[in-house]
Image (cartoon, helix red, strand yellow):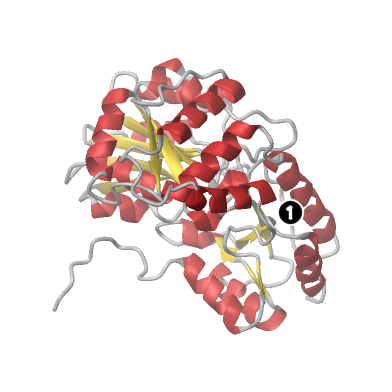
Amino acid sequence: MQFPQKHTAAPTTIFTVMSALATQHNAINLSQGFPDFPIDEPLAALLGEAAREGFNQYAPMQGLPMLRQAIAADWRKRYGVDVDADTEVTVTPGATYGIYTAFSAVLRPGDEAILLEPAYDSYIPNIEMNGAIPVPVPLQAPDFSVDWDAVRKAITPRTRALILNTPHNPTGAVWSMDDWNTLADIVRDTEITILSDEVYEQLIFDGRRHYTVLAHPELRQRSFALLSFGKVFNNTGWKMGYCIAPPAYTQAFRRIHQFLSFTVNSPAQYALAKHLSSGMASDVRKTMEDKRNYFLQLMKDTPFTIHRPTGGSYFQVAGYSNISDMPDMEFAQWLTKEHGVATIPISAFYHNKKDDKLIRFCFAKKESTLDEAVARLRQIK
């Protein structure tokens, strides 16, 4: 049997590869982006309550009404954005699923989709699996800002979609309102759909503000906003997310969604709805900013170079030129095997494996985990 090659990416993602290598060598896993500390106890208790209350069968395809209403109320409270829970919100089994479904809703074979690199590694395979052509545009180091002239030049009559990510994985860069306004100017007279990956929207540091596509009146009318509960409530293993889009876009999204997963874990939807509505969730922004600051303080005594503190997300990019001139993939493997700390090479986020001798650390960990990891890094000469 010859199976069709639906995309050009590696058979196994870099996250799986590095996590497996960490397990094999008993290394501390600062590679894959997941917390290693408990979720809020009230949220954990609500999952059991859901099962006892009978939320054990299929939820409606678009998501439990109570959760969609809680999402709408949350966005109104935090951003002053009015969202229609019935016609604009769809609950999904994670944000990565939502990204694929949004691409599937708009892309046709031969279309082009622009992405900004370095980029989350699902984007290009998602585009290719829909028969479309990925068009990577590099961000500008060292701050990984958008080269808007390059974006303009990348647009052709076949450009159908553009995906962005703020706060950005892997670099932690954060978009300004000027970025959104410039994007609006560029796409105004086109039929380009925007996919706004905002999974880290609540993990934003140093007094910065998250500007969401949903608060931009013009862009909102042509955009899918993709969000994650896992990044907000530290429960990435629940694989719960949602999509907010205008009614026509939501209809197109649901036409695909109903034949992929159809619906999403009912007990988790109940628990998230109750927890979101309670107003008692812990402050994830402060928690992660404190962890970032703690990690950066520890890293001062290592030979790694921190070019700038990350502005948001779970991640901090660091250079290792003071240690080695190895390619970043080789260095990440060496670091895991010889010093017991697993990271992600930044070249994995480029289609052409561009190597700037940078690696990504995940600091969404207990202080004891960060202490032990950096103690090992201090042994590097």
Answer with left or right where residue 204 lies relative to residue 152: right
Q: Is residue 139 visible?
A: no
Quarter of image, res 244: top left
Can you give x and y, in whole percent of width and height, for residue 273 in the image? 52, 37
What is the total number of numbered labels drawn onto the structure image? 1
Can you give x and y, in whole percent of width and height, for residue 316 in the image? 67, 53
Can you give x and y, in whole percent of width and height, for residue 179 in the image? 52, 27
Residue at 71% over, 50% down: 307
Q: Is residue 302 visible?
A: yes
Answer with left or right where residue 283 lies relative to residue 328: right
With respect to residue 19, does 104 lie above or below?
above
Residue at 30% over, 63% down: 8
Can you give x and y, in whole percent of width and height, for residue 137 in the image? 42, 43
Question: In the picture, which quadrant includes the C terminus?
Answer: bottom right
Circle 1 sits in a helix, a strand or a loop, which is it?
A: loop
Question: In the picture, which quadrant includes the N terminus?
Answer: bottom left
Identify which amino acid the numbered label 1 is placed on.
Ile
Identify the residue position indicated by label 1 in the image: 306
Q: Residues within 10 Å of mark 1 (few under 14, many from 20)?
A: some
Quarter of image, res 111: top left
Residue at 31% over, 48% down: 134
